[in-house]
Image (tube, rainbow, N blue to C red):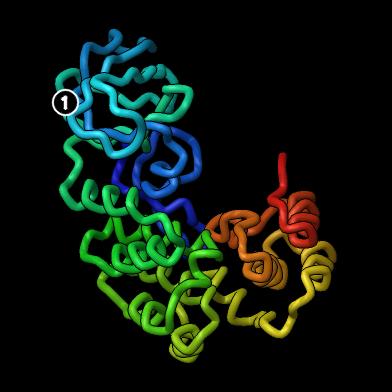
Amino acid sequence: MRAAIALAVLGVLGAFARPAHACSKRHQTIFELFDQSPDVAVVKVGAIPRAHYAGPVRLRVTRRLKGPARATLTAIESNSSCAIGLRAGRAALIFLPTNRRPDDESYFEAPSPALLATLAAWAKAAAPADRAALLVTTATGSDQDLARDAAMFLADDPALVSTLTEADAAALAAPTADPYGDELRALVVARTHGKAWRALIAAGLPPRSRVLAALAAHDDEAITDVAVLADIIATTPGEEAPARIAALERCERLHGARLEELTTYGNGRAAQWWLKLAVACRTGTPPTI
């Protein structure tokens, strides 16, 4: 079962302790899960395999949020570290992937009305500006877990960031009682490179954020040639070099597309992967393994 929404950005946004999470994988926001899953629904769980066994589980749909109308869905429970821990008779929200093998981040028992309302609104938000507006509203809302997920998703999507207004950036820059969320929101503000970002720099930025410090120290806004940025990425030494991080962030915005998640590459990358990212900067095509 999915734990409380976690930050998979330990070194990027400070040395934060991630909540217990059995499955070894990067954190996926609810917005990413929704976009990637062909079926998203509130279900009632049927009979399950015996303890520690894997196998199919019938799910009775009580509310469909995405996918064709079906009375039932079938999930395949795992006996790996990614096992959901399905419990018969429970009501749950599930993000069901194509292979029918969801992991423990894809399952919420007793989903909150706020979570369901946010996903219902997300399903209707087709245009980039509408999606960005919903993410800003959610990221500045009172539900901490939803706010963090919205800020993280927005921070990793330069095309959506490009639609933000100065008012949006100012709202995201306002401090709250959640320092983890504040650093994620500050990362969105950083990608706007506007007044709110300059105000954050003047205020000293969140003190433990490596990626924000990198973007503040290396302002590449004057560079409009991706080849120049690619050379910086390829030739700058250091797996955590701030100049590399800032150059790739600028390159993504010039392409208007994500080449890799800033919330992860802001923590550094292996030397050979930086070379792949340099090629990606030149071509605008994300690297492959």
Above-or-below relation of 70 to 269: above
Q: What is the crowding at mark 1: few (fewer than 14 residues within 10 Å), some, or many (at least 20)?
A: few
**Image quadrant for the N terminus?**
top left
What count of labels does the image hold? 1
Would you place residue 74 above or below residue 10 in this image?
above
260 relative to 36 in the view: left or right: right
Can residue 124 be seen here? The reply is yes
Question: In the figure, is residue 209 to the left or right of 267?
Answer: left
In this view of the protein, which residue sits in the foreground, 183 or 226? 226
Identify the residue position indicated by label 1 in the image.
90
Query: In terms of depth relative to the viewer, which is nearer, 213 or 123?
Result: 123
Q: Position of residue 112 (x, y in %)?
A: 17, 46
Residue pictured at 29% horizontal, 56% vertical: 146
Residue placed most toward the observer, 202 or 67 = 67
Does 72 sit above or below residue 110?
above
Note whether 139 is above or below 49 in the view shown: below
SS class, disc 1: loop
Question: Horizontally, is 273 left or right of 175 in the view?
Answer: right
Please provide percent x and percent y for residue 281.
75, 61
- Residue in view at x 78 percent, y 57 percent: 283
Residue 1 appears in view: no
**Residue 231 x %, y %:** 84, 68
Question: Which quarter of the picture shows residue 108?
Answer: top left
Residue type pointed to by label 1: Arg
Name the image quarter holding residue 141.
bottom left
**Horizontal and vertical percent position of residue 41:** 27, 33
Q: Locate residue 121: give its quadrant.
A: bottom left
Q: Is 27 displayed left or right of 139 in the figure? A: right
Q: Residue at x 59, y 62 (%)?
A: 266
